[in-house]
Amino acid sequence: MYSLNVPVPGGVQRLAAELHPRLTAFDTVRERHTLVAKRLGDDSLPRLRERLRPLLRDTPAFEARITGVDFFERPTKGTGPVVYLAVESPGLVALHDRLCEAFDPIDGLEGDDYVPHVTLARGGSLADAEALAAVDVDSVTWTVSALDLWSAEFRESAATLRLR
């Protein structure tokens, strides 16, 4: 299974680390922070690269910004709540929409249901999620100039695709 991910910069990693002590109340805390642009399925790596090449050819670099902490009370998959860093990025949403035309969107997660985010933790109480969402965090803004083709099997980037 592959996905196309936005690499998160050190500022986002540092923000997640600052919030880490507040995440201990949750069942699972993410140590690896990712921002999924689109899940792509089980095609071979060479085939995915060929399918992505024309879709990304004219995609300019775009801005992304962490706007705060939020949560999904009842996530589509897995246990909730899911606490995350909210991401604002019209460029990312536009890219996601284009990718959904070429790769079937996953019901409840993609297409109109897509919410750009960086997961911090899941499981635990709704009260803990609400308390964390009330915490003010510094905004982190960065320019996305490349995307990672992520392999779920190997839990690593299989390729980096540069944007124009």
Image (cartoon, helix red, strand yellow):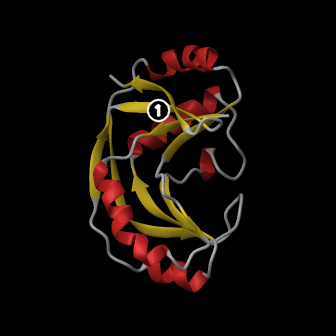
**Percent x, y of residue 100:** 61, 34
Q: Is residue 51 left or right of residue 6?
A: right
SS class, disc 1:
strand
Looking at the rendering, in which quadrant would you find the N terminus?
Answer: top right
Q: Nearer the viewer, residue 64 or 154?
A: 154
Looking at the rendering, in which quadrant would you find the C terminus?
Answer: top left
Q: Specify the amino acid type for callout 1.
A: Asp
Relative height, residue 145 to residue 15 (above, below): above
Q: Quadrant of residue 56?
A: top left
Residue visible at 48% across and 35% down in the picture: 95
**Percent x, y of residue 81:** 62, 72
Q: Nearer the viewer, residue 20 or 101?
A: 20
- Crowding at dot 1, Cα within 10 Å, few <14 / some 14-19 / many 20+, comes out as many
Residue visible at 71% across and 58% down in the picture: 77
Relative height, residue 113 to residue 37 (above, below): below
Q: Nearer the viewer, residue 11 or 51?
A: 11
| Residue at the farthest front position | 154
Residue visible at 65% across and 36% down in the picture: 153
**Percent x, y of residue 61:** 32, 32
Residue visible at 60% across and 35% down in the picture: 154
Q: Nearer the viewer, residue 79 or 52?
A: 79
Q: Is residue 136 left or right of residue 102?
A: left
Q: Is residue 69 left or right of residue 105?
A: left
The residue wearing badge 1 is: 148
Relative height, residue 8 to residue 84 (above, below): above
